[in-house]
Every structure is written in structure tokens, then in C-alpha cells.
Amino acid sequence: MRLFARVSETMKARGASAPVLVGGAAVELYTASAIATGDFDIVTGRQNIFEQALRDHGFVRPSGAGQSTRGWIHEGLRLGFEVVSGQLLDGHADRDRVRLIDLGADGRVAVIAVEDIIADRMGQYASGTAPEMLGQARSLYHLHCDADLDYMERRIREESAGDYGIADLEG
């Protein structure tokens, strides 16, 4: 997380908005590592600046047979980062709800709001291709009783085409 904070600070120093942590790493953060995924999915509208900042901090893009070329790897730390979008949940999430976490001298990291990551997980569950996402959404919901329930209900309904809501998390 500290390295991500330094990359974020590099981007801000170059005039770009901080990238936002989404996906599995956000779930891992919000569950205090109770759910571990090992990947860092990032949203940034300035991918070129983000990728240069990654290079500046020791990341490389794997190449060669059998290597994925979508992400970036830090060889020393065995961390992988991948830009998954230029907009937070395709523009449906409220950017003002992004949580900023201060990591001291390393800087701050921006993380998708817990309500939005729950809605994202419910949308993936609703698609029928990721049944395990319901468990992640429920864990997040039960750990974050301080969440904005009205906003979360609306976002879950949006992500699941109206099929699911907060009641489905309470089981």
C-alpha cells in the first residue's frame, strides 16, 4: 500500500488526479485481509502518467511467451498492478465518496467507497458468472455498518439491474 501511495503522489506531482484502488485489493483493505486476492486493480483517467510513475518506482511490464502484458509487476515485492478502467465503475460511482487513506510520509491512497465496492460485487454476482461475489459483498456489508445505506441500496440496484438490494446482503 505504501508503494501505491508513492506512485499516487508522483502522479499528483505531475498534475494528474490520484489513481483509485478498486477490485480485490479494495476488498482486502476493507476486510482487514479477511478476504485476500493479491491483485491491485486501478482506475485512472491518465494511464500514461500512471504507467510512467510505475516505471519510476521499479515496476516493469512482463514480456515474453506466457506472460500477461496487461499489468505491471514490481519484481522485488512481487506486486502486480493493472489499470482496469479510466472511469470509476464506468462513471456510475460518486467520485466524492472515494476514501483517502493517509500513509504518512509515503502519501495518501484513494480507495473506492465501500458502498460502491459492495455494489460492484453484487453486480458481478447478478451476472451469474461470479457466485463467490455474494459472499464478499456480505462480508463487506457486515463489517461496515456505518455505510450510507440509501446510497448503497441505489448503487446495488443500478449494478444488478434492479434484481438485488441490501436485503440480499443480510443473509
Image (cartoon, rainbow, N blue to C red):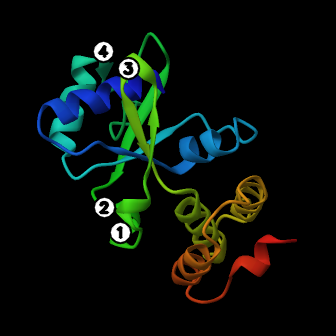
Q: Is residue 63 visible?
A: no
Q: Nearer the viewer, residue 2 or 147?
A: 147
Q: Which numbered circle lies on residue 55? A: none
Q: Secondary structure at mark 1?
A: helix
Single out the mark in the foreground, 4 or 2. Answer: 2
The residue where tag 2 is placed is 87
Secondary structure beneath dot 2 equals loop
Tell me which residue sits at (28%, 42%) in the image: 18
Q: What's under tag 2, amino acid-wise?
A: Gln
**Amino acid bearing label 4:** Gly
Mark before the other along the chain sequence, 4 or 2: 4
Residue with the mark numbered 3 = 106
Question: Mark 4 to mark 3: distance in Å?
Answer: 16 Å
Looking at the image, residue 130 sits to the left or right of residue 107; the answer is: right
Q: Which quadrant does the C terminus fall into?
A: bottom right
Q: Which residue is the site of mark 4? A: 58
Q: Position of residue 91 (x, y in %)?
A: 33, 70
| Spatial separation of the CA atoms under disc 2 and disc 3 | 25 Å
Residue type, label 3: Asp
Q: CA distance from mark 4 to mark 1?
A: 29 Å
For mark 4, give the secondary structure.
loop
Instruction: Using a 10 Å C-alpha cutoff, classify the residue at mark 4 as few (fewer than 14 neighbours), some (14 to 19) or many (20 or more).
Output: some
Q: Residue furthest right?
A: 171
> Which circle's residue, 4 or 3, is located before the other in the chain?
4
Q: Looking at the image, do the residues carrying marks 1 and 3 touch, with CB atoms under 8 Å apart? A: no
Tell me the kind of residue under disc 1: Asp
